[in-house]
Image (tube, rainbow, N blue to C red):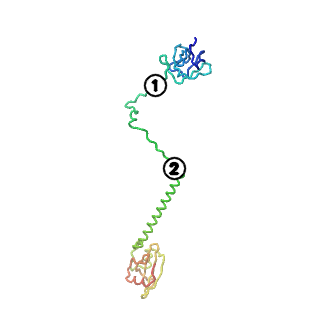
Amino acid sequence: MSVPLIAAGLAELRHGRFSFYPAIVGVRHNEWILRRATWTDILVANAKTSEELCIPRRFVGEVSSIEAPFRIVGLVKELEYREGVALPHRRSVIEMPLAVNDFNRSSLRPALYGRPAGVVAIRAEPDSESRFWRVLRGSVAAGILACVSVMFVVRDAHLGTRFGWTSATARLPNFNQQDDYSSVVRKLGNPTGDRWFQSAFGSRGYRRLWYSRRGVTLILMGASPDNARYAGTLNRDGEIIHSVDADLINELDSAPVLR
């Protein structure tokens, strides 16, 4: 059969059969014969069913140069056969049925999400630089804390000296005038230092027993070191903190200062 009119670019389809790509939806046999071609549309017939189909020219693309086994005519859109006319194919979206007691969450989206959240640009500092500044800030803070601690210690020490605060003397056993050197050693142990001083009044003297760990000095008074008896206790500053002898102050005033 002769073709009345062939548009430019489709002359090679005058003889032989061809196929469309992509294949037209709704047509099972993709083998066609050209009936007519104009500037607006082309009329083709199915080679197996002889059913004619009109396709708008704007949907027809390029024609392949290879003839075996058939030429291929490209379609710029996927077409669908409907009532003798090829129209753009629309893929239907199948909505899944809702479960029991479920609801369509898309209806809540406008209420819950009025508009997209704003994006805030965050610039991260380099790891090496941020680590350096963290170490530097930590060192400065530690230095300030150490300085403040030293200031408080110095202040408290100064105030303690000014107002007469002294370290507490260790608790001592009870001594009386019957305690001699042997009984003192039994109660306190051996002294760190042991010295005898001769008094300037009469023939009496006193024996100084120094206990460094307790911070006290025990005074034993008598005619000699062997028969001296307990008279009192001095602290680190040489002050009398316990006494059983009324003459102890006078005896110490006449002797070298005990430290």
Callout 2, which amino acid? Glu
Give residue 181's quadrant in the image.
bottom left
The answer to whether residue 162 is above or below residue 89 is: below
The answer to whether residue 246 is above or below residue 39 is: below
Tell me the quarter of the image containing the N terminus: top right
x and y percentages locating residue 103 in the rendered image: 38, 32
x and y percentages locating residue 227 in the rendered image: 43, 83
Residue at the spot 58% in from the left edge and 12% down from the top edge: 2
Compare marks 2 and 1 and give the one earlier in the sequence. 1
Q: CA distance from mark 2 to mark 1?
A: 51 Å
x and y percentages locating residue 148 in the rendered image: 45, 64
Q: Which mark is residue 102?
A: none
Give residue 66's quadrant in the image.
top right
Q: Left or right: 41 with respect to 163? A: right
The answer to whether residue 134 is above or below residue 46 is: below
Q: Residues within 10 Å of mark 1 (few under 14, many from 20)?
A: few
Q: Which mark is residue 92?
A: 1
Q: Which mark is residue 125?
A: 2
- Residue 33 visible: no
- Residue 79 visible: yes
Q: Residues within 10 Å of mark 2 (few under 14, many from 20)?
A: few
The reply to whether callout 2 and callout 1 are in contact (CB within 8 Å) is no
Q: Nearer the viewer, residue 52 or 243?
A: 52
The answer to whether residue 49 is above or below residue 237 is: above
x and y percentages locating residue 10 in the rendered image: 58, 19
Q: Nearer the viewer, residue 174 or 30?
A: 30
Name the element at disc 1.
Answer: loop
Residue at the spot 43% in from the left edge and 39% down from the top edge: 116
Callout 1, which amino acid? Ser
Name the element at disc 2.
Answer: loop
Q: Residue furthest top?
A: 1
